[in-house]
Image (cartoon, rainbow, N blue to C red):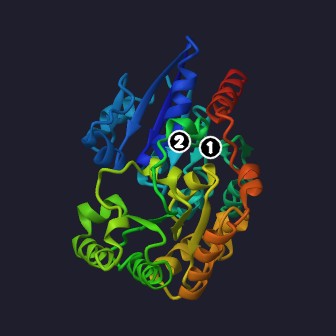
Amino acid sequence: MKNIAFAFSDDGAYENVNPVRLELLKNQNILTCGIVSGRALERNINSGLFFFADNVIDYKTNIKTFCKFFSGIDALVLGVSQGSSLEFELVKALKGICPIYVLPDAWTSFSAPGFWKNGYNLPDYVLVNDDLGEIGARYWGFNGEVKVLGSPTFDAYFKINKFKKMKLDLPLVLFIGQGTGESGDIPILRDLVNILNDEFFKEVFFYPKEHPRMRSELFSESREWDNIVNTFKDKNRLLVGNDYNLDDMLFSSKVVISDFSTVLNKAVLLRKDIISIAYPDLEIVKGYFSRHTWTNGVFPLVSLNCALEAKSKNELCMLIKRSMEDGFGLEDNQRQYFTTDGKNSERVANFILETISAV
């Protein structure tokens, strides 16, 4: 019997590791347990999503139990997003005791030099979606084994017939906003609403979706967001509120616009036209590239030619027009880098089983 522990501190990381856990549990010789902290607790357990019912520990509230929890673990699987202290402490405690696997949440985990650049407390394996994931790991000096197995999160998008397509008589423009406390994507939203009012009046539906933390933490930013959204002139084609499922809206959209949201990865899986906003003077853009130095100033989806980039309001307007007229034609690249055969979780689980059996 093998006991495999899973740990994560973010809901995005949970979405990447839980499918692997469920796949491993198909093997009757596998037990699993979980450690969670941070936003994983705050944003998921409070909303009714329960983590790993067989064994859950919030390590910050009970350090003694947390340390005792290590006994008998045969492998550790980390879902790393921004690289919290949870992941760092776990690797430090279990390095050399059992194999350690990291499943990065897209490419965002490589913005955490505190986790990767310590030189000695590093995992044994990094399991990534694509070649850029390996580049990100190597950038921080990781010399262990990197395997390109596909992201388990993407398996949910294998059967797209589960999504509901909105019955709309005009194209849908979807904007995914981020909240940072430093105005975030407010300037982008303002430009976008002005473009839609001036160039596409009564020609599109508009669905602006803000980041969840904006409503719960960034109240002034949230108010400004609402004020700008309310300037959209075609009220009959403005879709707002919590009545809409994001996946359904992605499925129904013609073009999806954001800066660097991981929601764009889902849009790739649904083969949508994608615009990544990279205004060079915008604080959120400068902050992203200062943290993700390994990208050399180009958003990974743009590097993979799965999305197009807008560095100004004029470029944004031209790309929206291009999407409406001819489309971007990037589907072949999207299929190449973002597989949706529904077997990414199985590949990751099989690799873990193979390697722990060899120990």
Q: Which mark is residue 263?
A: none
Q: Quadrant of the rendered structure where residue 84 is? A: bottom left
Location of residue 11 in the rendering, given as x and y in whole percent from the top left corner: 41, 47
Location of residue 171 in the rendering, given as x and y in whole percent from the top left corner: 52, 63
Which residue is at a point 49% across and 78% down the rendered structure image?
Answer: 200
Residue 71 appearing in the image: no
**SS type, badge 1:** loop
Which residue is at a point 33% across and 66% down the rendered structure image?
Answer: 236
Answer above or below: position of 252 versus 257.
above
**SS type, badge 2:** helix
| Mark 1 or 2, nearer chain start | 2
Determine whether, in the image, residue 216 is placed left or right of residue 159: left
Of residues 125 and 272, the one drawn nearer to the viewer in this rendering: 272
Which residue is at a point 37% across and 72% down the rendered structure image?
Answer: 180
Circle 1 Cα neighbour tier, 10 Å, few/some/many (<14 / 14–19 / ≥20):
many
Q: Which residue is mark 1?
A: 151
Say which amino acid is labelled 1: Ser
The answer to whether the residues at label 1 and label 2 have Cβ atoms under 8 Å apart is yes
Of residues 241 and 346, the one drawn nearer to the viewer in this rendering: 241
Q: Quadrant of the N terminus?
A: top right
Determine whether, in the image, residue 67 is placed left or right of residue 145: left
Location of residue 341 in the rendering, given as x and y in whole percent from the top left corner: 69, 36
Of residues 142 and 254, the one drawn nearer to the viewer in this rendering: 254
Circle 2 Cα neighbour tier, 10 Å, few/some/many (<14 / 14–19 / ≥20):
many
Q: Quadrant of the C terminus?
A: top right
Q: Which residue is mark 2?
A: 16
Answer above or below: position of 306 versus 269.
below
Location of residue 152 in the rendering, given as x and y in whole percent from the top left corner: 59, 39
Determine whether, in the image, residue 147 is placed left or right of residue 253: right
Say which amino acid is labelled 2: Asn
Gap in angstroms between the C-alphas marked 1 and 2: 7 Å
